[in-house]
Amino acid sequence: MSTPFSILAEDLAFPEGPVVMPDGSVVVTEIGRACLTRIAGGRTYLLAETGGGPNGAALGPDGALYVCNNGGFSWDTSQGWRPVARAPENRGGSIQRVDPETGRVELLYDRCGDIPLVAPNDLVFDAHGGFWFTDHGHRSGRKLDFGAVFYAKADGSAIREVAFPLIGPNGIGLSPAGDRLYVAETSSGRVWSWAVTAPGEVAKASWPSPTGGDLLAGLPGFWRFDSLAVEASGNVAVACLRQGGILVISPEGSLVERLHFDDPYTTNICFAGADLRTACITLSGSGRLVSMPWKRPGLALN
């Protein structure tokens, strides 16, 4: 049974990356239309045209929107929106900075040293003004570009690889104290965590690990994880593909709650309202941004 919700916007082209703005409006990326869209008062407004495939987004310390651009997908729209492959015109991914007032789009990073960005997916800012982000990688036929986690400065001056390899790293978040980094891996259906030792630095797990991190959760059944958000208590709320829902996982790795939605492409969650007890969720296959009351307060983002 689907969880009840209110529709904030519909007819969107695979929306992701919801960001609650200071004025209470919500900005989403539309991967299928290669743009950022502002939603306010039941209406949608074009904010910026980014090209490629704008994916995760976050509000930076300078008031700009920072966008992970995956370069663009090919789509199957016979029954809603479904990404099927890297678009033929995809020339690689990037991190973009967007002025929310003018819509001006600026390229911030398209590589880390000699490593080109393949398909940046999601990002989160820390208390120091830098941001962590995932590069999902791509699969093409029998070949796979492994994914990675990076850390970068918001002014474009420095970027470093933090964790490699991962198989489809997607959602990313920080614990309330900023001392744990969480990453959801789509293909394996796992959530990994690392101890943060300094801005852009993590400690590797003490036991052999394919990602270098500790396994927070790997639940029974077939799960494909997408984006995530962290609650004020430290719980991690992970959006789930195929199963269509949100899983809430405790900092110890146990299942706290499972919510069902009527869209197998439930992709993102963020928290809104003065008490951060409203969840904004993207149901991407059906092109909707929805909201619902949340039992516990979300974590205020940096």
Image (tube, rainbow, N blue to C red):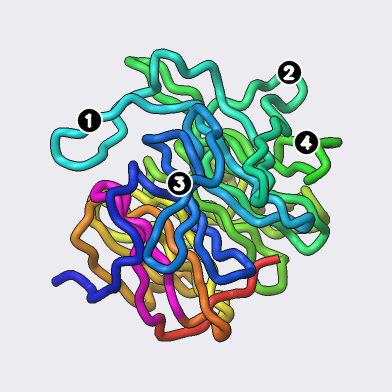
Q: Quadrant of residue 278?
A: bottom left
Dividing the picture into quadrants, the one containing residue 279 is: bottom left
Residue at 37 percent of width and 35 percent of height: 32
Mark 2 or mark 4, earlier in chain: 2
Placement of the N terminus among the 4 image quadrants: bottom left
The prevailing secondary structure element of the residues shown in magenta is: strand
Label 3 or label 1, whichever lies nearer to me, is: 1
Nearer the camera: disc 4 or disc 1: 1
Q: Does the magenta-highlighted stretch encompass residue 291? A: yes
Sequence order check: which comes first, mark 4 or mark 1? 1
**Dot label at residue 242:** none
Q: Residues within 10 Å of mark 1 (few under 14, many from 20)?
A: few
Q: Hey, what amino acid is under mark 3?
A: Glu
Which mark, residue 114? 2
Label 2 environment density (alpha carbons within 10 Å; few <14, some 14–19, many ≥20): few
Q: Residue under circle 4?
A: 159
The location of residue 8, given as percent across then percent down, is 35, 65
Pointer 3 residue: 185
Q: Nearer the viewer, mark 3 or mark 4?
A: 4
| Span shown in magenta | 278-293
- Label 3 SS: strand
Which label's residue is closer to the chain start, 3 or 4?
4
290 horizontally vs 178: left or right: left
Query: How busy is the neighbourhood of tag 4: few (under 14 within 10 Å), some, or many (20 plus)?
Result: some
Element under disc 2 = loop
